[in-house]
Image (cartoon, grey):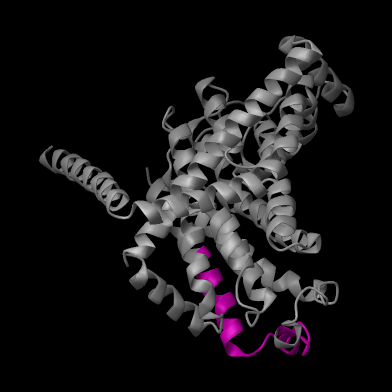
Amino acid sequence: MFQPLLRSRLKSIALASISLFIAVILLMYPEQAFKSSLRGLTIWWDVVFPALLPFFITAEMMMGFGVVHFLGVLLEPLMRPIFRVPGEGAFVMAVGLISGNPMGAKLTSRLREQGLISREEGERLVSFTSTAGPLFIFGAVSVGFFENVSIGIILALAHYSSSILVGLIMRFYEPQAPPSSSMKKNEGFILIRAVRAMHRARLQDGRPLGKLLGESVSSAVQTLLMIGGFIILFSVLVHLINYVGVTAPLISIIAQILDWFHFPIGLSDSMLSGIFEITLGSQIASASPDHIPLMYQLTIVSIMIGWNGLSIHAQVASMLSRTDVRYIPYLLARIIHGLLAGVLTLIIYPFFEKKLAGYSSTLPVFSDWTSTSFTGWGGLQQVALIVFFLWMIHTCFKLIKKRYSAN
């Protein structure tokens, strides 16, 4: 009993110390805090807000019209045999893919509160439905930061393929846990059932078009305000702790790791920023010096998007805290997702090299690296990178089984 009490007190002291430290550096460096806050606000207002607002409104209207329920019924036969989650998880997966973070965690929490999924199913579900939205990848990152929509194809293929792989891996999480319900029997042609589900959802919603449109706009703006708040908050935190020198040792460690794998060490700053906030990390990576090959920039960005960033982690943890769904499986799944996305980006990129030939004047730098064909891959260091990523994925998977399967 003494040990949990001591741990709780140490946690309170640590949280209080961190908040006090943040308050002190805000008071000590008000100019830097203002500039970094303005930088986060600029990224949100100029890129994220216009890119995501129309999509969020459309997604809200699709839910009101029952379109997502239609998609959920169509995906139901795939969910339990493949991912070991009930058919209702198809709804979360569909909305998560359409709307992006943190919608997957929000809906998973709601299903758990309604008793439609078990705790273990919720932990499986949130692990692979917490994805970046396609408009964030194509609109904010590809068009907004890199100014090339073809880059979005590479990032999207790597991100969503690795998300499915994470779902397959998490299928083996808690193998002894009983399902929340048995798989529904076939009640007719699946397309007819999907249409009926869409019709029932629209009738249950009951809102007229004008009210639905108004509430969709209001909900979308509210969600984007929350996202903007986190972007600004983490922009201030990242730049202030970097300004006072706290991140210097971490950047040095990341630079050494990148250098060992023959990645440009100039990406270490963007990678560290991406650990906190993927929008900031992606923006810094896209503004890297001309001598840094595009392939490496995209690999780092892909890892960051799969990781989600601590900004989104904070949102997810807040939503899951209302239920008994645990955060640790989500955290381990994000590590696996990021590593898988990075590996897949390295695999996919050579197939798009010619399409990106006019993107940057730095093409000869990385064109020589990949011109030896896909199988060459630039020597032992790049092969070691793939092996290291796969080993990390294997280690994370073993940690999941060891920590939770024994319970």
Q: Splitting the image into 4 quarters, where does residue 125 fall?
A: top right
Q: Is residue 131 above or below residue 210?
A: below
Vertical relation: 276 (above or below) 74: below
In the image, residue 71 above or below residue 45: above
Q: Is residue 337 visible?
A: no
Identify which residue is drawn at 36% across, 64% down: 243
Residue 13 placement: quadrant: top left
Magenta segment boundaries in residue numbering: 366-393
Question: Residue 42, relative to residue 350: is it above or below?
Answer: above
- Foreground residue, 261 or 309? 309
Q: The C terminus appears in which quarter of the rendering?
A: top left
Horizontal arrangement in the rendering, residue 216 relative to residue 339 (left or right): right
Percent x, y of residue 6: 14, 43
Q: Residue at x 63, y 30 (%)?
A: 221
Q: Is residue 387 magenta?
A: yes
Q: How many marks?
A: 0
Q: Residue furthest front?
A: 31
What secondary structure prevails in the magenta region?
helix
- Residue lying at 60% horizontally and 56% vertically, measured from the top left: 305
Question: Viewed as shown, does residue 383 lie left or right of 209?
Answer: left
For the residue pair 117 and 224, the one nearer the viewer reads as 224
Quadrant in which the N terminus is drawn: top left
* Image position of 370 (left or right of 42): right
- Residue 67 place in picture, x, y as percent: 80, 26
- Is 370 part of what is drawn in magenta? yes
Q: Position of residue 321 (x, y in %)?
A: 41, 32
Q: Residue at 28% x, 46% y: name it.
A: 23
Residue 398 appears in the figure: yes
